[in-house]
Image: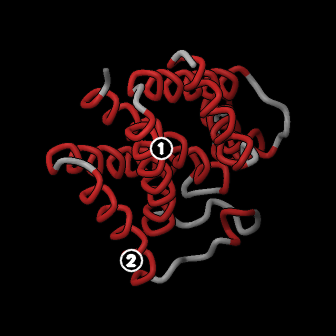
Amino acid sequence: MPPLLAAVWTVAASTIVTGGFHEDGLADAADGFGGGTTPARKLDIMRDSRIGSYGALALLLSLLVRVAAIAGLGRPAIVTTAMILAGMLGRSGILLLLLVLTPARDEGMGASMGQPRVSSTLSGLGLAVLASFLSLPILLATAVVVSGFGSALLLARLAHRQIGGHTGDVLGACEIATECVVLTVIATALGV
């Protein structure tokens, strides 16, 4: 199968397996952050099930980045490693947000997550870092971890400024954004 077509099917399969859960959060967060003028209005927009132009653009760009990165890697073994690490670091980004932000609302999925125990969170983060260093050359692993966690912390800062904390949508957006950054770094270093 040509690399581009294989990459599209890979992202499609990944999205089907997760139910597009994180993509929904990305779209809602982009619509809220882009469309609202006050934190309350941004939160209202994020609850709206309809997708707006900011959400559609965020989804399109995230799909394009993932497909291009996977197609650029080309070799199945490297694609598999990159996808696993991107997923692990993306979900670790969620842990970082839960550590550094409080919920922006009293109800909803973000609020139901609660404040994780620091020891459990550090264990989760440590596993993602360890997997990166066991799977990639040291300099690339360092770049992947720093850029992945850095993007999550930048999103945390943005969420704090926009709505004063996190929501389930922000957590989903963090997973996708971190995944895109990790895949981009790996594809830039190891791409064909």
Residue drawn at the location 76% of the way across and 39% of the way down: 45
* Badge 1 element: helix
Q: Could you say which is closer to the camera, residue 38 or residue 185? A: 185
The residue that appears at 65% across and 28% down in the rendered structure is: 9
Q: Nearer the viewer, residue 13 or 75?
A: 75
Q: Is residue 125 above or below residue 186?
A: below
Q: Position of residue 136 (x, y in %)?
A: 25, 49
Q: Earlier in the sequence, mark 2 or mark 1?
A: 1
The structure residue drawn at horizontal position 35% and vertical position 52%, both measured from the top left corner, is: 149
Callout 1 crowding tier (Cα within 10 Å): few <14, some 14–19, many ≥20:
many
Q: Is residue 143 left or right of residue 76?
A: left
Q: Is residue 182 above or below residue 60?
A: below
For disc 2, the marked residue is 123
Q: CA distance from mark 2 to mark 1?
A: 21 Å
Q: Quadrant of the N terminus?
A: top right
Q: Quadrant of the C terminus?
A: top left
Residue at the spot 45% in from the left edge and 81% down from the top edge: 120
Q: Which mark is residue 91?
A: none
Three-letter amino acid code at the position of disc 2: Ser
**Residue 172 on image: x %, y %:** 61, 49
Residue beneath disc 1: 83
Q: Secondary structure at mark 2?
A: helix
Q: How many numbered callouts?
A: 2
Instruction: Name the outermost residue toward the front.
Output: 1
